[in-house]
C-alpha cells in the first residue's frame, strides 16, 4: 500500500501519521520525515519559494518510488504528501511516513523514499531572494545520497 | 503530432509551457526531436546546447536521447529536479 498526495494546502503531521496506523495491530514502527522551507540557502536569504510540478507524472513518480520501497523492505504502509505553489520559511514542504513491523526497515525505507524523491520526482523550486527569483540548482550531494541505494 | 511540455527554468527561458508540433520527417527519437528544436533559433539552441543538463520524459516516464517518439506522445523537457 502507498498513499501519495500532491497539494497546495498544508497538512497536519499528527493526523496523517495517525491515519497510517489507525485500526492496525501489526505496526511496530512508524518512521517519518518532515521537510521545511529554510530562510537561507547557499549563503543568501530566502523570503519564500514557489514549487512547480508536472501534474500526473509527479504523482506516478512518487507512487513508483513507494512501490520500490515496498519491494526492497517488508513494509506495511507508506505515505508521501508533497506541497506545491508558494511557500514561506517555516512552512512544511513534504511528509514521508513509513509503517513497518520493526524500526530498521521503517527508518531505511523513509530515507530511501526521500533520497529518491529528491532526485527522481519532478518538482522544481524557485526561491524569492532579495536579488530576485532564482531557480534552485540540483545538488550533487543529493545524487550521491540516492546512488548509495544502488549497491 | 506530438505534445511538447516545458517546465521550470526551461519554460521561462523559452517563454513556452506547451505546444503541439508535427513530428519532423524522419524523427523517431528524443535525439532527433531535440535536433529539430535546436534549429529553431538562438534561445532554443542555447537551451538545448550540448552539456546543458536538461531531462526528458516521454508519456510521463523518464526517458533519454535514444527513446523513440511516435505520433500522439507527450514529450516533456525540464531541468534536474529539486523537490523535497
Image (tube, coloured by chain):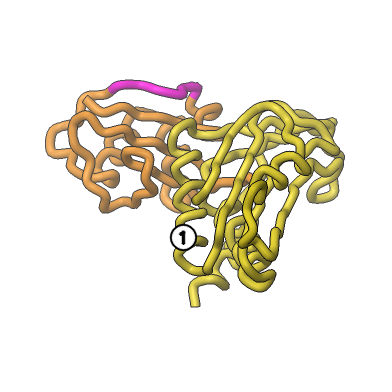
Residue A5 position, x and y percent, is 57, 37
Q: Find out whether residue A126 is within the magenta segment.
A: no
First to last magenta residue range: B15-20
Kindly indicate the quadrant of the structure image that contains residue B69: top left
Residue A77 position, x and y percent, is 56, 54
Taking the spot 61% from the left edge, 62% from the top edge, the residue there is A26
Q: Find out whether residue B18 is within the magenta segment.
A: yes
> Does A77 sit left or right of A49 as displayed?
left
Q: Is residue A35 above or below residue A5?
A: below
Q: Which residue is mark 1?
A: A68
Q: Is residue B40 above or below residue B78?
A: above
Q: In the rendering, what colour is chain B?
A: orange
Taking the spot 60% from the left edge, 46% from the top edge, the residue there is A80
Of all chains, the one bearing label 1 is A
Residue A75 position, x and y percent, is 55, 63
* Nearer to us in this view, B47 or A50: A50
Q: Is residue B72 above or below residue A103?
A: above
Amino acid at each position: 500500500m502507498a498513499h501519495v498526495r500532491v497539494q497546495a494546502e498544508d497538512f497536519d503531521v499528527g493526523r496523517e501519521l495517525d491515519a497510517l496506523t489507525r485500526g492496525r495491530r501489526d505496526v511496530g514502527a512508524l518512521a517519518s520525515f518532515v521537510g521545511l522551507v529554510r530562510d537561507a540557502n547557499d549563503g543568501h536569504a530566502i523570503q519564500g519559494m514557489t514549487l512547480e510540478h508536472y501534474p500526473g507524472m509527479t504523482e506516478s513518480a512518487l507512487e513508483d518510488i513507494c512501490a520500490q520501497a515496498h519491494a526492497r523492505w517488508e513494509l506495511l504502509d507508506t505515505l508521501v504528501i508533497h506541497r506545491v505553489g508558494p511557500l514561506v520559511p517555516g512552512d512544511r514542504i513534504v511528509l514521508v511516513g513509513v509503517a513497518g513491523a520493526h524500526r530498521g526497515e521503517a527508518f531505511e525505507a523513509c530515507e530511501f523514499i526521500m533520497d529518491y524523491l529528491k532526485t527522481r520526482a519532478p518538482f522544481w523550486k524557485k526561491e524569492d531572494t532579495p536579488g530576485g527569483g532564482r531557480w534552485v540548482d540540483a545538488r550533487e550531494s543529493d545524487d550521491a545520497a540516492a546512488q548509495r541505494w544502488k549497491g | 503530432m506530438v505534445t511538447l511540455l516545458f517546465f521550470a527554468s526551461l519554460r521561462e527561458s523559452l517563454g513556452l509551457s506547451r505546444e503541439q508540433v508535427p513530428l519532423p520527417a524522419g524523427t523517431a527519437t528524443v535525439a532527433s526531436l531535440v535536433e529539430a528544436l535546436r534549429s529553431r533559433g538562438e534561445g532554443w539552441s542555447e537551451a538545448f546546447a550540448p552539456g546543458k543538463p536538461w531531462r526528458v520524459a516521454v508519456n510521463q516516464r523518464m526517458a533519454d536521447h535514444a527513446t523513440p517518439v511516435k505520433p500522439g506522445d507527450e514529450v516533456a523537457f525540464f531541468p534536474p529536479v529539486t523537490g523535497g
